[in-house]
Image (cartoon, coloured by chain):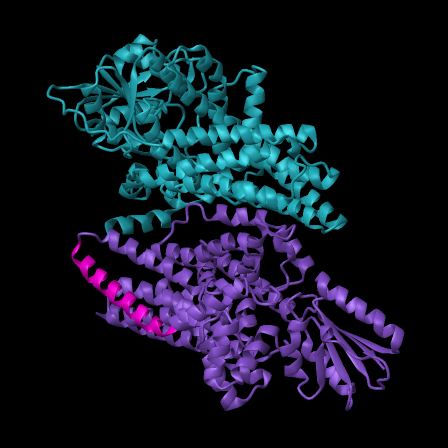
Chain colours: A cyan, B purple
Amino acid sequence: MSPSADPRLLDTQHESQQLARPTGERVQLLLLANVTLAIWYFSWLLAPERVGNRALYAVLVAAELFNLVQAVGFWWTCAGERPRRAGVRPTEAVEVDVLIPVYGEPVEVVEPTIAAAVRLRGAQVRVALLDDGDSPEMEALATRHRVAYIRRLVHQGAKAGNLNHALRLTSARFVAVFDCDHVPDPRFLEVTISHLLTDSRLAFVQTPQYYANAIGGGLPAAVWAQQALFFGAIARGKDRLNAMFCCGTNVVFRRAALEEVGNFPEKSLTEDFELSIRLHAAGWRSRYVPEILARGLGPEDMAAYVSQQHRWARGCLSALPVVVRTRLPWRLRIQYLLSAMYFLSGWSMLVYMLLPVLRILTGAQPLAGASADQFLLHFAPYFLTCLLSVIMAGAGSYTFGAFALTAASFWLHVHASIVVLLRIPGRFVVTPKQGRVGRQPRAALPALIAVGVMIVSAAVGLFRDRSPATLNNVAFAALHICVLLTGVGPALQKSEGVVNQSTVNGRQGRSAA
Amino acid sequence: MGREVTAASRSRVELRSDLAIVLGLTILGLILRGIVTRSIWLDEAISITQAKLPFNEMLARLAAEDVHPPLHHAVLWMVVRLLGTGELAVRIPSIVAGTLLIPTLYGAGRDLYDRRVGVVAAALGTVAPIAIWYSQEARMYAIFMLFSLIAVWAQVRALRTGRPGPWILYALATAAMIWTQYFALLQVVVQQAAFAAAFWRRGGRENSRRLGLAWAFSTLAVLVILIPLLPLLQSQLHSYGDRSGGLALPSQAGLGVAQQNNQLSVYAIIANAIWGLWGYHANSTMAQIVALWPLGMLILLALLGRGYSRVSALLLAVAAIPAFALFAAGMAQRNLFELRYFAGAVPVGLLLVSRFASSAANRGARTLVVGLLGITLVIGLADQQLNGANPRLYDFRGALALISARAGPGDVIVYEPQFIGPVVSYYAAGLDARPLDAGLTLSGSRHRIFLLGSFLDEPGSAGQVGYALHQFDESHRREHEFRRPNVRVWMYR
């Protein structure tokens, strides 16, 4: 990737503004409407006369209640935010260790990160390249940029182990961590360190994990749109509740806080999540700055996305017992539970896909004592305001592509939760930073099977009869088919494996203009 | 400089090609609207009867018996004087308004969004079933649609430019809209709220005072133009109260899918949305289409992340708020929730749909979406116009033509229900026609009796006709029976 084609070097002012846009009073009013309409819908749904097929009803109610819990959590989180003033500017020379772990990533991905790290302003920066891949090229790269090169003899604990090893060899009061593809803005430390200097109980300052390759559209754009909702209203809300957790990159820690909790937990697949729990349990605070201060690369292909999401799902779900066991203030405990339980949402998607199939093939349906228009009357306002709150809270950043990708990943959540439940050990898999060439239908096979099942059942339904009841279920199946096909679209398209050059050039032109 | 010249000449070429397309579409639209396949409907027959009266008498009749403002009636009164009462003649005002809607859609789409939206909107407006349906009806709804679109377009232009022209056009279109249909007031309220929002947003800025003044003057102008309407409105409200809130007319047919246990259901909203875009269809078809509502969720989800403009928000509000207000009113009085009462939503909705369809990410997707939409509209149009199962198709013309072909001197037509009298008079002016409940001496007559029954899905009419058939069968010989869409004729001697 030539420097001129690297999207990580482009301006992100617009995206930053979108992440920082306050939710405002309109969203708060909408949240009130959400609560009212949720009560309206659930008081109808939970009426005893609504029970059709008992098993299906139970499953439907479970799925709806799970989604309601997630929705209420979202509304609570996004209900407000605390305006943060920049902290005091450092009056003393502040030392910061900048740690950049690598594990087999290409030099052209890592080099811009190293080059940008050494140019960080606002502190005495000591950059260290933590190479778990034992690569001579990395060593040469470190030498070229005059940064420390740290290599381990025993590779254990994956990224967490790599970072812990480096922490033992370094000594600065603050530690910044960047994934090797995340190019920091020169102002990164100027903006973040001041918060740590102002609040002595602040353990870390997190900034957005922006995917610069989103400008090329396709999968990275959809993945960033998912991230944008989190790093927008949700993260700002978590910041208000002092519940922002560390996301593993683009973050600066207080070394004392890390040391107090024994540094990064090495047995977790999501060491950042568990570390945050430990820090909060120890009474440390966290902060979120909604400004893009580092630009990275999101998954370029479906296999990379699946690998990333599966790791996150397994890691967060396996942290659930930790959240329950750990002594945390109630609001923090609920926030962590909400974040971890998000990775169970694939189950509800599975339920929604199964219900029309079962209705078409067997005639069994969860609801009784209600006509379809009554269901619509109670469900539609709830659905609409939920959708509207996502649109408004996310400042329009959450796209259909992001939604479809989440829906098409339902099986990842299902698989991850089964694996966690059965305690099957997993290993830390680094998310590939460059796309592979060609189609990847295997990475979306479960979703494609679901599409196939729904197409067949819809065809069977249409063949049998075209009554409004059947058509209604066929339409539900068609809705899921369209969403899933949109979600798995990137896996079925022939990937070129690199960021689209023309898009980058076009963006550069716009930036220049 | 050279680049500017190239851009200007390209713009001229584009405009010329657009004008050619729009002209072609307008001619096609005129032809489609001119091919009238429908019989005169009850409301049309009443309007024609009123328009045949002297002008003052017509106004008096409107004040005493009608619930609509007089602009369309006045136009129809002139048309009747100039061209007579032929089917095509009385529908000319609607055909003209409906045809003018096509270039207006283009202009509004191009001005509010871009030329692509303009062309798509004009193309969809050309074949939009409901726009064609009301363009073929000697009633006020096609004119209402036209003024509604002009009022919104002028409002956006007024807010954008602040020039007097759009403000004057807004005031005239708004006043004309209310002179055409009282329910237009709902749209006016939405548009006034939009002015208030714009004023509030500009609060404190230099141009806010100018906006405030122009807004005040335009509102004043609308009020002044409406003053002559007030005495008529007052009389109509008084008469309406005396009649205990309704005329002895049926609500529009085809509500089967939109109500449950004689109450408006939420499906009514979907049914009206479908009617608004794809036209009127058989109840069974509507039940099937309405059942596809989960696909509406897909459309809503597809809008995620698309962003929205203030223009789109205004158009959406103008289309949706009057409809929801009338839905709420329809809970109390069912027949108030009728697409024709918020027909202004149709062209505005077409603009929004055109915007949605033409904003797909790439050319292929755009072509696919617009093409599919256009095809479904054409299918909807064909089904609406030609399918006899459409519950809004009442072939009085066909039925009465069959009667006229067989009737001789002294023959009698008895019809049920009573309220179809004006349409029977329209098509069988020279025949002896009387309502069934007016009574008929059966014994000793050697003439033919034609029993014409309609609205037979309503228990009252079905019962009356059934009883009459029983009586006629005992005293007369049934010679023949005809069936036309929603009309039946039994011939006795």
Visible residue check, residue A2: no
How many marks do you count on the picture?
0
Residue A224: x and y in percent read 40, 38
Seen at 84% across and 69% down, the residue is: B470
Residue B376: quadrant of the picture: bottom right
In-front residue for pair A428/A3: A428
Residue B212 is one of the magenta-drawn residues: yes
Residue A166: x and y in percent read 31, 14
In-front residue for pair A390/B68: B68
Range of magenta residues: B205-229
Seen at 76% across and 83% down, the residue is: B412
**Position of residue B368 in the picture relative to residue B160 (left or right):** right
Seen at 71% across and 86% down, the residue is: B431
Residue A154: quadrant of the picture: top left
Residue B90: quadrant of the picture: bottom right
Residue B444: x and y in percent read 86, 84
Visible residue check, residue A27: yes
Q: Is residue B329 above or below residue B475?
A: above
Seen at 59% across and 79% down, the residue is: B35
**Position of residue A455 in the picture relative to residue A149 (left or right):** right
Residue A483: x and y in percent read 55, 43
**Position of residue A479 in the picture relative to residue A189 (left or right):** right
In-front residue for pair B465/B326: B465
In-front residue for pair A84/B254: B254
